[in-house]
Every structure is written in structure tokens, then in C-alpha cells.
Amino acid sequence: MSGDFTEIGRALPRKEDRRLVSGRGRYLDDLAFPGALHVSFVRSPHAHARILGIDSAEAAEMPGVVGIFTGRDLDQMTTRLRLAPPIEGLQPTELTTLPIDKVRFHGDPVVCVVATDRYLAEDAAECVSVEYEQLTAVTSITEAFAPDAALVDDSLTSNMVSHQSLCVGDPAARRAEAHRVVEARFSLHRHTHVPLETRGCVADWDDGRAHLNMHIGNQVPHPLRSQLAARLGLSESQVTVMSPDVGGAFGQKIALYREELTVAALSRHLRRPVRWREDRMENLMSAAHAREYECRTRASVSETGRILGLELEIDEDFGGYCFYPANYMARVIALIMTGPYRIQDYAYEVRVALTNKCGAGPMRAPMAITSWVMEGTIDAIARDLGLDPVEVRRINALGPEDLPYKMPTGELLEDVSPRETLEIAVDAIDVADFRARQAQARAEGRYLGLGLCTVIESTTYGSEFYKSAGIPGSGHESAWVRIEPSGAVNASVGLMGTGQGYESPLSQAVAEGLGVRSEDVTVHMGNTDIAPYGMGSRGGRGATAGGGTLYLCALKARERVLAIAASMLDLNDAGGLRLRAGQIERMIGEDWQEAGLSLTDIARRAYHEPLALPEGIAPGLDFSHSYDPPAMTYSNSTHACEVEVDPQTGAISIDRYLVAEDSGTVLNPIVVRGQQQGAIAMGLSGALLEQVIYDGTGQNLSATLADYLVASPNELPEFEILHHNTPNRRTPAGIKGMAEGGVMGAIGVLANAVSDALAPRGVTIERLPLTPQSIRALLREAAPSSTKRTQP
Amino acid sequence: MSAPTHDPLTLSLSVNGETHDVRVPARKLLSDVLRDDLGLTGTHVGCEHGVCGACTVLIDGRPARACLTFAAQMEGHEVTTVEAMGRPDALSALQQALHEEHGLQCGFCTPGIVVTFEHYLRENPDPTAEEVRNVLSGNLCRCTGYQNIVAAVLKAAARMRGEAA
């Protein structure tokens, strides 16, 4: 990493901690709104049913009830969500704010009850009776694609809402000439995000100004404002979105959900502040789900394990509603599948199904399954050919001589280091030593396993990516930096953090560009009237798009500051000047020496002595900047982990976990390390325990935290993190983005480690999660082992 | 069947050493009364079924779930919330260690963790990492992977014992 930075790369503890750690954070539900009304939703008990009638007469008479509203009412107050980007193979969809004719999943909001108190709203919601005619529920991809399947969305021609394919090179010819064709299957289960703070909002319609103040924990305040305004028939001048502290989001707080739009519409309708706080059951049933995929690969390989061609099929269960274009998440998986490996002959087919389950959305690492599929395929090749999985990785991995490398899908890899991180991880874990211990353990009837997983992590997502994907919108980001008359530095950007800890690293980006201390910069986010229109937080874009834009904007500010300083020092130009820690320094001989001017002096001149400014320089110190990053930036890593599986109980213990990671220039190593740890934890938790469970009729059986299990500290190991950071040459300061790759690596490495552990029992992991029950089931189904055969 | 009555009761609650007289329905949860009626919003509500631990407070000095307790049960008891354990400009040793070790991200679960370990470290001033993990298993954190929280608790414990850490 460049050693020239003074602020970027400092290990600064987070600015937000003091308020959060002392209970003085201000989350959505901490905000007081005198006289606010409270909302409770009546939700569908069925997965798929026609709404025949709604009787709210009894509820309407109950204490505190102000109003009861149905889909038909909301349809008068809002416009429908139509998603129809011109993408081949994607069926356009449209949905009303609340369902009118039929419900499409267990938990679908049907009626909205408004009362003076949350308890009273819930009481009344229980007394609303809805008459349904149950329909056949479509609860799996197979059922969805069956020729006689019931239609989840009656306006579509089939439940296959999206279907894309691509063929590059000649995979069929590679198959014909291959030494072997190795097939593998991967089934990733339905997850959900589980932010500790559930969704919620307070809509406060200002009737005098005809203005909506929407308080909502959200990752993308400006796009949310645009959608709110459009769906309410308001101008963007009439809506302010304000995001307070947010208790986690992980992709769940991007879409404008139907409940939130309902609350906003009712605030305007009732001319009162209206608030909603989702309970945990609602969050688990009906916020957003993610990740349900079935994948198959077919690798054509040489005798040495070199991959000649790869074919991939992905089927995704998208649930009942499209809040995003249905090709969106699966497409990225298919685009980056070949990742760290030299593969040019590649074909994919992606099919997305609508089913009677909660709608799917992006979740931290929407492409999470990618690395498991690719690395599981590598392990399948090694098993099939009797080769060392490390050698199969080496022979296929991209090395420095291959870069820049254009993947068969056109994605460009540059300044990445997959072979280097592989070697670092392999060295650190000491594979030879592990194999010896594994053999010893196997002789004792114990099952140790080693997994490896190399990750190519797509981050940032510039406009060029969206345009080439046919998706409307932009990947640029906007920032302003303002030096106030006192010399105080304020800045803003369109991102909104939801717990990552943006305040310190983004201050560091500003401080580096401008030449002040990070401690003296304040970055204001989460208010659409204050922040410039930006695309918000998602897709690992905080550092490159957000930090990068702030850095460039601060450079612009510095240029002006130095020009004013030069004139104050009677110099012809600013060539020999710099700003360091808020002081002007001048190059004298070979040394930088203080020039006796501070940023405060310059700010005072800029604001209060405009006539003394050099010709052509306007008063004030107010700067803005927009920046569109490359189509995609890539980080990479190799994960390695050792596990032991107890064949009697099916329990997995993770004995060692390490990751060698290349995430480019790091703004703040403390925050980055936290993101790495958190991402790995989320991946392991998902692979070990978490699972949204629907029964065959579409009933959600995992709507409490006693049923939807999230890892506690007892299931998670310590993570060893090794750094190998290569700056990206095409981004400001060499930033790349990170924070999702840990999820990708954790899922893949755990599955591979357990497959390795259970190899003597003939078990290969093709399906997650790896709960004790699922491991025991696999062992029961597998061919009996020799040791087992000798037992009675 | 007659409808349940939700007429308010008058309660006298002792919270953080102060006595508050409130009129609330008998069914109102302690977590909601602390937050809505007393303005002590540091006690967070994450699940309302006792699993996540974000609402943990001390009742007569022992950790308890405020979301599984009715405020009406608290008459004659002393409730302590995170607000009594340190301020932004005067953090407790545990809060300071959480800050230094990056033991929080979104911070929503953090008050529950602070309350749990302010109590635990007084009773068990020299815990092992494994013991800390066992106690911490009552508090869900979705952001950190727990490693830094464990490190922070051990660091705070050492400091509270008067050792350099």
C-alpha cells in the first residue's frame, strides 16, 4: 500500500461508538413524535389465497382505532410498482401497495389498522376478519416450473419470471475433448437478514407545507426518496428522507417496502404523524428473504485438473413478489463465477422462479453462493481425478502474468492477487501438517477436514455495470466538502451507514484529500436535504464510491485553499505549498516548514475578506463533486479452515479459521477488520444454522429467533486475518471495496472442509445448512463405512 | 366473553435510583415503559420474545429481559438500565474497552451486552475467554462475529482488576 498517506490507513476508533455504547444512540424507535398514530398489519395466514371479503366493523369500533385500510384504499392513495427493464427473458411485473385480489405468501400484509397506541392497534388487528379461498401453494422451484403449476402472479405467462443464458467459446467442444467431465451440485437454502433492529418508519406529513418527512432506517436515502415521491404523486421537493442510527440492514433496508409506503400514504391521508415498528415475527416472515439457489456445474478437465470449459445452471427461488428485477442477483453470480481461475469457454443458464414465499432481495453478498460453487467444483475435480485440491487450484489460478484478465463474461480483473492469497493461506494453515494430523485422526475414528476457498469479490458497481446489465439507475456517488468560516470541516455524501462505522473512514478520506486531521472532519449522512443525491450503501461501494468521491472533492477544496494561501503569502502560485493537519506548510530547500497560516486564517479570508481574494476566486469554501467509479472493482481472498465433525451427533467444530485478503487501500484498518470478521461470521452462521423453513403448504415455520437460529459466540471461532493489499490503479487512492467476500468465502470453505472431513464416509456436501440433523441424515444415507459395518 | 380491560394502573417505579410515578396499562412491558414513558431509550427491543438480549436490564442487580417483564411487576424492585452505566463523555471501563477493541458495529445489541457484563464482571472479575463466550451467548450480535466483544470484556476485566491492559 502507498506509504504516502497520513490520514488514510490510520487505525482510528470509530466516532459513533461513544453514543452507541452508552445507550445514547438514536434509532428509529427512539424518536418521539407527540400525537403519533401507530400501525399494525393484518397478515395472511395462507401462502396463496384469494381475498373474498374483509370485515373490519368490529375492529373499527375498538378503543383507540382511527382507521382501517385495505389494498383497495391504498390503491387510491399510491401508484403501483411496475418493474419492466428491457432485459431479454425478464417478464415485467406490477404490484399494488397492499394486495387487492389475492395473497401470495404467508405473512403478506392485507389490512392496515391505525390506532392511537401500538397495543390497541394490535388488539384491533386481531379482530379484523378476512375471508379467503385457498389456492394451491407453489413452494419450490420444481413445483413452480411444473407444466400445470398454479400461477403465483396471475398477470404472467409462467412462474419463470426471468431466464437468461450465455455461451462464450465452445464449451461443448471442450467437453468432447476433455479427459473427464466432472459434475457437481450445490443447493443453498433460504436465508434472511436478521438486523437486530427490525424495519420501521415514522411518516410525518406537514400539512402546512405539503411536505412529507419520512424517518426511516435505510441504506439508500435518495433513491428511497425518489420512489416515495413517485409512488405518492409528490415532487422530490416535497419529501425528505431522514435516516437516524440504524441497527443493521445487510441489504434488507434498500427497497421501499409496501408497509412503509402504506404508512407514508396514511400520514398524508390522516394529516398526522404515523409510525410503524415491525416485530420480530413480521421481520422473519415478511421483510425480505434471500439466497435460495440450486446450482449445477459441469467442468471439462484435463488429466492434470486443468479446467478446459465450464457450464453452469442456476435456478433461484425468488418468492412471491419482485421488489428488484428478478435477474438481478443471479446474474452477478453467473457473471463472476469463473472468478479466480483461467477459464475462457463458459456457458450459463439462469432461471428465476416465483413461488408462494416471501419475496427475495439482496443480502450482504447477494452473490454469496458463487465461491462455494466454483471452489466446490474444484474440489470435485480433485476428488474425481485423485489429485491434491491445492494443486488443482494452483494449476488453474490466475497469477500476476495473467493480469489484467478479461473473464469470459467480459468482466475485467486487474490488480487482484488470487494465486498470492492462495499461497499465503496454504502456507499459514500448513497443509502438509494438517494432512498428517488428519490421517492420524482418521485412524482413531475421528473426522477432521480442511477446506479452502478463494474468492473474487465484486464491489462498487459503477454506472457502466448497471447500463450493461440493462438496469436503470447509476453507480456514481456525490459529495460535498465545506470549510466553514471558523475552519471547521463539514462534508457529506449520499451513503447511509447502517452500522458499518462510516464516520471515521469517510472522515479519513476527506482529511487525506484536504490536509487536515480526521478528528477535525464531520461527515453528515442520512438526510436527503443535507446530503447530495447519491446511490447509497450497497454492493461494497462505501469505500470506493463514497470514500473515493469525498477524497476527490477534498482535493478540489485543497486546491482552492492553497491558492488563497499562496496569495496571502505573496507567492505567484501554490506550487511549493501544502496543507498538513490544518496548517499551511511551505517547501524551503528540501524541507517542509510551517508557513504561519492555518486553515482557519484562510477560511476567515475566504468568507469575511472577499475583496482580498485573488482575482477569479469566489468567496466561501464550498465544494461539490460527483464521481463514477469503474464498472466494477474486485477484491480477493483465500479462506482456509479446519473442522472436526462428530459422526455421533453431527456437530461441527471449527478448530481454526484464517483468511488471506486483498482489499486494496484500506481507509481504516479497524473498520475493515470488523467488516471481515462480521462477514465471515454471517457466512458461517448461515452455513451452520440459519434457515427459513416453509412446509409443503407454504407455512413459515421459522418466524421466531428460537426457530431461525443465528450463531452465538459458542459456534464461531476466532478469525486469523492476513493482509496482502494491492491498490487498484484505477480508483482514487487505490480503494477497492470489501465487506461481502467474507460471506462468500465462509460458506464455501465450511462446505469444502466438511466434505473433506466426511470423505472416508463417502459424503460430499451438496446442500446447506450443515445442522447436526442434516449431517446425521447424510451419514445415515451414505454407504456404511467399514468401521460402522463391524458394529452391531 | 367480556373484553379485557386496559385501564391504566398507577405504578411507582424505581429506575436508576430515581422514583417515577407512571400511569400505564397492566399489560405494558417494562421495555416499553422504560422507553416510551421514561424516555430511557437505551434499552432496545430486538425480538420481544427473550432471545436476542438487546433489552437486558438489571432488576435488583441481576440481568433480566425487559421485554418479558411487565412494568407492573416492578413495584418494590430496583431497575437499572444502560443509561446508569456511563455517559458518552464518561464511559465505563467496559464501554471504553468495547470502543477500543471495536466490539460493536450497528450498536443495537450493545446496551444489552454492556448491562450483562457490567453485572457479570462484578461477580466474576477474572473470567476466561470461554466463560465470556458462554455468557455472551445470551446476546445476539449480527455484526461483529463476537471476537472483538470477547476481547473487550477480557480487557475491561483486567483493567477493573487493576492490571495494565
Image (cartoon, rainbow, N blue to C red):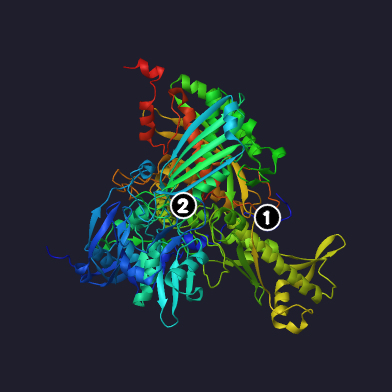
Disc 1 target residue: A731
**Residue A689 location (% of width, % of height):** 40, 41
Res. A761 image quadrant: top left
Label 1 vs label 2: CA separation? 30 Å
Amino acid type for the residue under numbered disc 1: Thr
Left or right of residue A307, residue A92 in this image: left
**Residue A204 location (% of width, % of height):** 41, 74
Label annotation for residue B92: none
Relative to residue A484, is residue A435 depicted above or below? above
Res. A405 image quadrant: top right
- Identify the chain of the residue marked 1, using the numbered disc in the image: A
Left or right of residue A574, residue A678 in this image: left
User: Quick one: which residue is furthest to the top in this view?
Assistant: A790
**Residue A729 location (% of width, % of height):** 71, 51
Disc 2 target residue: A326
Name the mark nearer the viewer: 1 or 2: 2
User: Quick one: which residue is furthest to the right in this view?
Assistant: A589
Say if residue A582 shows up in the picture.
Answer: no
Closer to the camera in the image, A604 or A499: A499
**Residue B1 location (% of width, % of height):** 11, 62
